[in-house]
Amino acid sequence: MGTLYIVPTPIGNLDDITLRALRVLHEASLIAAEDTRTTGRLLAHFEIATPQISYHEHNKLARLDDILGALAVGDVALVSDAGTPGLSDPGYELINAAIEAGYTVVPLPGPNAVLPALVASGLPTDTFLYLGFLPRRSGARRAVLEAVQDLPYTLVMYEAPHRLLDTLADIAATLGERPLAVARELTKLHEELWRGTSSGAIERFTSDAPRGEITLVVAGAGRHIGEPWDADQVRAALARRLAAGESRSSAARALAAESGWPRRRIYDLDV
């Protein structure tokens, strides 16, 4: 029986591939690739001649029997176009099918955009929540953000450049003014890691339209930069906002990012 290897591939810089990944790609009987043309260029660069089979979002269920059949007689390497298969890329169904069929599944460590963006963001890394790609429609996107707005975990998500501003607007509307980082084109020639706040990011990327692949890292509820406020400070700030006509929910959301207090606790304060 063969082994299914989960093989991360570079997200930009080809030097990021590991020696172990190259060995597995060379020795496997078959490579299940998200796009055989993309993987073909990588294999050609490293002079690897292992045959490929396409395995992508639109054929992943139809290909399961073919790949499981290949595993019966040899090792299979699963790769996506870039990064780690199964992490917002095709792979889950195949990995699960291989496990259920009794095959050994071996994950290789390697490139991805989540961890580099997180550790370079300057935001807390002790606990984080990966949200993958947010929904394309604003209503659904806001529903996801509202579901996590009170959680203290740093939030990490992928976004397409043409949706970045809309997503930043939804972040500002649901999560309030929070510290965040926009990691763009990681490991590539035009790599950029912008750090600031929700409103600052909207201003920055309105004046300079983003390009390339983007990873967003957003502070969790109460994980602001600076010392938490005391109760008198929070109560006074809430009173000022309410006196100015701001709704209690909006004021609580904005003050949560500024004060280090949970939004719900601010909302329930007597003023």
Image: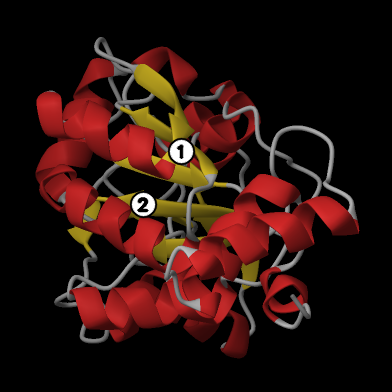
Between 51 and 12, which is closer to the camera in this rendering? 12
Say which of marks 1 and 2 sits in front: 2
Label 1 sits on what residue type? Answer: Ala
| Residue 74 x/y as whole percent | 48, 61
Asked whether the viewer can see residue 37, the reply is yes
Classed neighbour count for the residue bearing mark 1: other residues with Cα under 10 Å, few (<14), some (14–19), many (≥20) = many
The span from disc 1 to disc 2 (Cα, nearest Å) is 9 Å
Which residue is labeled 1 in the image?
113
Q: Is residue 207 above or below residue 250?
A: above
Quarter of the picture holding the N terminus:
bottom right
- Residue 223 rendering spot, x and y as whole percentages: 72, 48
Does residue 187 appear in this view? no
Residue shown at the point (44%, 47%) measured from the top left = 28
User: What residue did someone put label 2 on?
Assistant: 158
* SS of the residue under disc 1: loop
Quadrant position of the C terminus in the picture: bottom right
**Side (left or right) of 37 relative to 224:** left
Look at the numbered disc 2 and give the secondary structure of its residue: strand
Asked if residue 238 lies left or right of residue 40, the reply is right
- Looking at the image, the residue that sits furthest to the bottom is 100
Check the image and report above or below for 116 versus 161: above
Callout 1–callout 2 Cβ contact below 8 Å: yes
Residue type of the residue flagged with mark 2: Tyr
Q: Count every numbered label the image shows and give the total.
A: 2
Which residue does the image show at 20% across and 48% down from the upper left? 165
